[in-house]
Image (tube, rainbow, N blue to C red):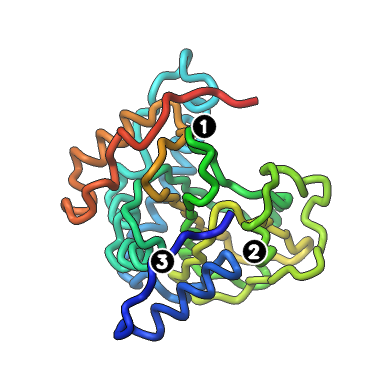
Amino acid sequence: MTLEMRPFPEDEDDGTAAARRRFTDSGYLVLPGLLPEALVRRLEPEVDRWVDDGLRARSIASSLDPDTHGAPPLLELELPAHGELLAFPPLLTLLDDLLGCPFVFHHMHSDRHGPGSAGKPWHHDYEPNAGADASLVMVHALHYLGGLTTEMGRLVVLPGSHREAAGKTARAHLGTAEIPGEAVIDRLPPGSTVLINSALFHARRPTPGRPGRPRYFVDASYCQTGARWRPVKPYWRHMLARARELDLGGGRWPELFAERHFTEYAATA
C-alpha cells in the first residue's frame, strides 16, 4: 500500500518535501515535541478522567455490544483538550501536505499505560474501504503526551511494511519479538507524535522489571477521501455529528467530519 502523492511545486519548502519522501518510503514520521506544553497539561488530566471514571471501559463496551449499551455517555472528542488535539492545526496542515488531498477523521482512542503494562504484538491498523483501493491512505497520529523513555516501553515499527498486502495480524504470532529491519522509538520529549501509515506493522514492546512513569497515549486516525471507509465504531454517526456540533476544526477542513465517506458499520470477528 503506497501513497499516491501529488507533485511538489518547484518552490515548495525542501523540509516539507523531505518529510513527505520519508513518510512515503518508510511509512512513518517522528515529530518530537509537536504538541505545546499548555495543551499537554490539559490533556493528561482528561486521560486520567477517561480511565479512572470508567469512561474508557464504557466506550469499549459500547463498541463490543452496542445493542446492550448504546452510544457511550461521553466521547473522547467531547473532552475539550481531546477535541482540540483531534483538529490541532499544525497536525492537520502536515496531513494536508503529506496526503495531498482532502481527508476525513476516522476515530480516536485515549489510554494510560501503567508501568509494567503488557505489550501489544506486531500488527497494523489499516481498515479497508468499499472500493478495495489500497492506494488510498489511512494514517494514525500516535501522541505520547509525556514523551517516551526506555522505562515506558518501546514503540517498534517495521519500515516499508506498509507496502505489503497483509492482514492486520499476519505477524501477531511473533508477539513483540525483534524483527530484522525494525526501528525502535523509545526516547521522545513530552508532547511528541509519531505519524504512521496505518498499514505499517508496529508493536508496543514492554520493558519488564523496570519501573517508570505511566505512559499517556492518545491516537487519532484520518483517511484520504475518494472511497467509503469502514467505520470501527457502531456509533460513528453520533461521533461525527458531535464533532460538527462542537465545530472542531472551525470549518477549515470541510471534509473532516463528513458522513458520506463511510460505509455502514459491520461487526468483525
| Distance Cα–Cα, label 2 vs label 1 | 23 Å
Task: Say above or below: 127 vs 18.
Answer: above
Classify 10 Å Cα crowding around label 2: few (below 14), some (14-19), many (20 and above): many
Question: Which residue type carries mark 3?
Answer: Leu
- Residue 266: horizontal and vertical position, in percent? 51, 23
Disc 3 marks which residue?
98
Q: Residue furthest top?
A: 67
Question: Which residue type carries mark 2?
Answer: Leu
| Distance Cα–Cα, label 3 vs label 1 | 31 Å
Could you tell me which secondary element the residue under label 3 belongs to?
helix
Q: Tell which circle, 3 or 1, labels the residue nearer the N-terminal end.
A: 1
Give the residue drawn at x 47%, y 70%. 192
Camera-nearest residue between 97 and 87:
97
| Distance Cα–Cα, label 3 vs label 2 | 22 Å
Disc 1 marks which residue?
60
Give the residue drawn at x 50%, y 60%. 3
